[in-house]
Image: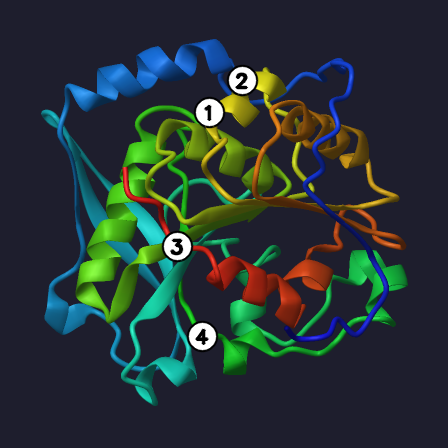
């Protein structure tokens, strides 16, 4: 196991049961609608078509592409970012896939804002988020842009949807499948993460397609409308929940952690960055131990 080079609070799943906690408003659709939403989508085929193979990237870097989405009789384009690390072309291994959900601003088409912050920002530049200067002095300098060992996908949510709204979870799941077929990837090691709005969406997407990912990592997320129900639905999915101690989302992450404890979730990590603010995501994503934990998880057979 790689040694973490800076101090943080690192709490593994405990068996203790806590009293129920209140819930703050969340921006996504109510949890009670998720089951009926997933059922409705299941009756309509969801198809995602990538650009022709001759137009797919064949060199390292970050690329914005447009896929064609078909749901029943409806068709529309959807932009997604594709990250191919340098190590992909120097190796013959099957790479994991990591899906990074963006924050609330970059909705639409064309890819604008996809790499402004969150994990995708570290695919294109070696930097910390200037808004979290307190945490930067203690961070290890892992360079994802040069040393990542995964294929990255950053779907851009269409303006008329939220990531947690149907049919977006099903579209994301199918996008992962199609990228996995186009590149040399391991179908049992696809992971979902997101920061802020993307972190909240991480919970909501996973609830609707719980068998698609090997693990999820919501960072600085809001709580879902029903944390206990979310924890129950995701009881078979490894979870890495993280936030900064000085951020507004600390209380909502505490709620999600309490729900995981109440359901005796067997495989989760709760991490609090002691000097971190809301923008402490580079602390997580630039830590080798995070990737060691994540890539140790494989999708469970359904």
Q: Residues within 10 Å of mark 1 (few under 14, many from 20)?
A: some
On the image, numbered disc 4 is attached to which residue? 149
Mark with earlier residue (4, 3): 4
Between the C-alphas of marks 3 and 1, the distance is 18 Å
Q: Is residue 194 left or right of residue 13?
A: left
Between the C-alphas of marks 4 and 2, the distance is 34 Å
Between the C-alphas of marks 2 and 3, the distance is 23 Å
Q: Are marks 4 and 3 in contact (CB under 8 Å)?
A: no
Mark with earlier residue (4, 1): 4
Quarter of the picture containing the C terminus is top left
Secondary structure under badge 2?
helix
Looking at the image, which residue is at 42% across and 77% down?
85
Residue 113: percent from left, percent from top = 52, 53
On the image, numbered disc 1 is attached to which residue? 233
Q: Is residue 171 left or right of residue 203?
A: left
On the image, numbered disc 2 is attached to which residue? 229
Residue 298: percent from left, percent from top = 39, 54
Give the quadrant of residue 165.
top left
Mark 2 or 3, closer to the camera: 3
Q: Is residue 177 left or right of residue 64?
A: left
Looking at the image, which residue is at 52% across and 83% down?
146
Between the C-alphas of marks 2 and 1, the distance is 6 Å
Compared to 166, does 151 lie above or below?
Answer: below
The tag on residue 298 is 3
Q: Are marks 3 and 1 in contact (CB under 8 Å)?
A: no
Give the quadrant of residue 84.
bottom left
Residue 277: percent from left, percent from top = 83, 49
Q: Are marks 2 and 1 in contact (CB under 8 Å)?
A: yes
The tag on residue 75 is none
Mark 4 or 2, closer to the camera: 2
Mark 4 or 3, closer to the camera: 3
């Amino acid at each position: 196991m790689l040694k973490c080079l800076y101090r943080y609070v690192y709490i593994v799943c405990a068996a203790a049961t806590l009293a129920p906690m209140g819930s703050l408003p969340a921006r996504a659709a109510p949890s009670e609608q998720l089951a009926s939403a997933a059922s409705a989508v299941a009756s309509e085929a969801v198809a995602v078509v990538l650009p022709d193979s001759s137009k797919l990237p064949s060199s390292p870097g970050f690329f914005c592409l447009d896929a064609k989405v078909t749901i029943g009789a409806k068709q529309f384009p959807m932009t997604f970012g594709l990250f191919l690390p340098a190590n992909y072309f120097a190796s013959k291994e099957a790479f994991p896939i990591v899906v990074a959900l963006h924050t609330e601003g970059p909705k639409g088409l064309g890819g604008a804002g996809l790499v402004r912050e969150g994990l995708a920002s570290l695919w294109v530049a070696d930097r910390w988020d200037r808004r979290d200067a307190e945490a930067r002095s203690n961070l290890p300098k892992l360079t994802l842009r040069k040393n990542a060992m995964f294929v990255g996908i950053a779907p851009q949510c269409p303006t008329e949807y939220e990531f947690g709204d149907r049919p977006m979870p099903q579209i994301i799941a199918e996008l992962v499948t199609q990228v996995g077929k186009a590149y040399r990837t391991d179908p049992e090691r696809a992971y979902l993460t997101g920061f802020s709005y993307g972190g909240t969406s991480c919970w909501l997407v996973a609830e609707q397609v719980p068998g698609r990912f090997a693990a999820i990592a919501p960072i600085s997320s809001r709580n879902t409308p029903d944390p206990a129900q979310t924890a129950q639905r995701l009881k078979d999915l490894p979870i890495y929940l993280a936030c900064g101690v000085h951020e507004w989302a600390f209380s909502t992450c505490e709620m999600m952690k309490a729900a995981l404890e109440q359901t005796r979730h067997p495989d989760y990590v709760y991490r609090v960055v002691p000097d971190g603010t809301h923008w402490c995501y580079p602390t997580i994503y630039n830590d080798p131990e995070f990737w060691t934990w994540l890539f140790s998880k494989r999708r469970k057979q359904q």
